[in-house]
Amino acid sequence: MTFNKLLTALYISCFLFTMLTFHSTALAEIKGCQNDNAHKNTFYVSSLATKYKGKGTRSNPWNSIEEAAYQVPDNSLIIVSPGVYTGQVKLNKNFSQGLTIRSEIDYQAKLTNDRRVVAFVSEASNITLEGFEIYHNSKKPKPLIVHIDGGGSDKVNNITLRNNIIHDSYNNDLLKINNGAVKIKVLCNMFYNQGNSDEHIDINSVSNVEVRNNIFFNDFTASNRKISNKSSSFITIKDSNGKDDNELGAHNIHVNSNIFLNWQGSHGNGFVLIGEDGKNYYEAFNVKIYNNLMIGNSDISMRSPFGVKGAKNVWFYNNTITGDLPSNAFAIRVNKEGKNKTNTQLYFYNNIWSDPTGTMGMGDDESYADFSDTMLHEIDDFILENNLIWNGGKELPTSFFDAINPSDDKYLLTFNPNIPNTQTLIPPIWIEEKKEFKDNSFTISEAFQRLVYFYGTTNLPIKAQGFSNNPYYPQYNILGRKRENKNSVGAL
């Protein structure tokens, strides 16, 4: 047996052992996904309670979350019993010490409506919503599912969404964060099936937003919906309204340690897009995209998994992009649209771009392998350094007309990262009848870890761990574990 075959056999054996021991070793909660139980007061809500006659006790609960949030004092926990809660949940109260609203059993309290389902407005602050299933109950609803609306100021702040399943908007976004809201955390949720021409998350004219450890995908067929190929990017970061609120340009945005998969959207979009509306100011700046796993397991073509339009100071580092990902550009699209300023200060460090099929890009409108679409006059300065790029052993694509090419990376790595085949992936949609996800996970955290271990692991030789002294790298990886080597590549 040759050394290469022996190495491959050893890798497969180790991988299978990891899968067999998965349940006993890998399912500790990811850092930040755990519930916070430190509250002074506890109150209760039940869909079976009588309206307006409850006291918030276990034996005599309130009937609605909105009523409970209005009644409770600061530093409280509201426990919501299993059941279906129809109508809008409007939260508009400031809690200086905090309010947590929690489904008593994960995903068994269901919030649904034929229009906006949950709204954080007015002076809503220091509120956490966790453990719910949230969705539209009509195929012709009014817009949005969850809305965090700053109202033009920073009074809506310190809002956390944790461990929720937010799915199936039939009109507009799954989650919109806009109009000057600040200090927003979107942690450990699952998002799927937005409305046509809209996003999973629209981060629009806001600041200090963290999107971490979430799963993003579409599976329209599983929800008895047609794949229209009209939906937009999973996450868009931009500023549509200029000086109409207290923010000009979305900024200080961190999108880290998320999983993106199963593209079913329009050919003009991708997983993450920065800038969109062709404005004459930087629509976004100080944006960091890192530790994400982007999986190409769909045969539906996209524009590029990552795009930038009219932005500055954007960091894209330690991400893993893997699989046969039909697209116009397998890695990056950077362009100007409308009145956009020239893109500047773009930094790409320590990423893995791996297409084991050797068809890097080659989507519906691209006959040849293509790494990036970056016209020379539409980008000012950038750094591409210490990245691993693998095209199934074939020559890496390069273009005289594009500003960014693999050859620009002076520390370029070209090893096969040996990432497992993504074509066997089962999108982990929620199966209500079984009270579990389609991949047999019982929690979002478990589904997240399964995806990382099955489709994000690598087997790199030591000399492929990177060479440069990077000015910035994530201290922890996608699973929240400390990195031993600051020059390591990829999300894990």
Image: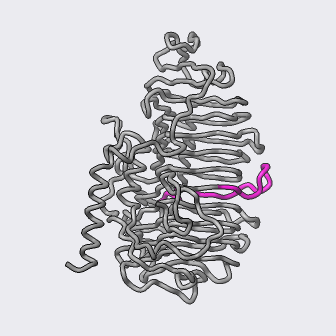
Q: Does the magenta stretch include residue 482?
A: no
Tell me, yes or no, if residue 209 can be seen here: yes
- The residue drawn where x is 49% and y is 19% is 46
- Left or right of 29? Residue 385 is right
- The residue drawn where x is 61% and y is 41% is 147
The x, y position of residue 10, in whole percent, is 27, 67
- Left or right of 142? Residue 341 is right
Q: How many marks?
A: 0
Res 82 → quadrant = top left
Q: Eyeballing the image, is 81 above or below 224?
A: above
Tell me, yes or no, if residue 365 can be seen here: no
The x, y position of residue 413, in whole percent, is 48, 78
Res 284 → quadrant = bottom right
Res 139 → quadrant = top left
Magenta residues, start to end = 230-253
The x, y position of residue 15, in whole percent, is 30, 60
- The residue drawn where x is 44% and y is 60% is 229
Say which quadrant the N terminus sits in.
Answer: bottom left
Identify which residue, 105 or 146, lies in the foreground: 105
Q: Eyeballing the image, is 480 above or below 489?
A: above
- Left or right of 100? Residue 246 is right
The x, y position of residue 304, in whole percent, is 51, 69
- Residue pushed farthest left? 1
- The residue drawn where x is 33% and y is 44% is 24
Q: Does the magenta stretch include residue 244?
A: yes
Identify which residue, 121 or 485, lies in the foreground: 485
Q: Eyeballing the image, is 395 above or below 477?
A: below
Q: Eyeballing the image, is 231 above or below 301?
A: above
Q: Which colour scheme is used?
A: one colour
Identify which residue, 122 or 77, lies in the foreground: 77
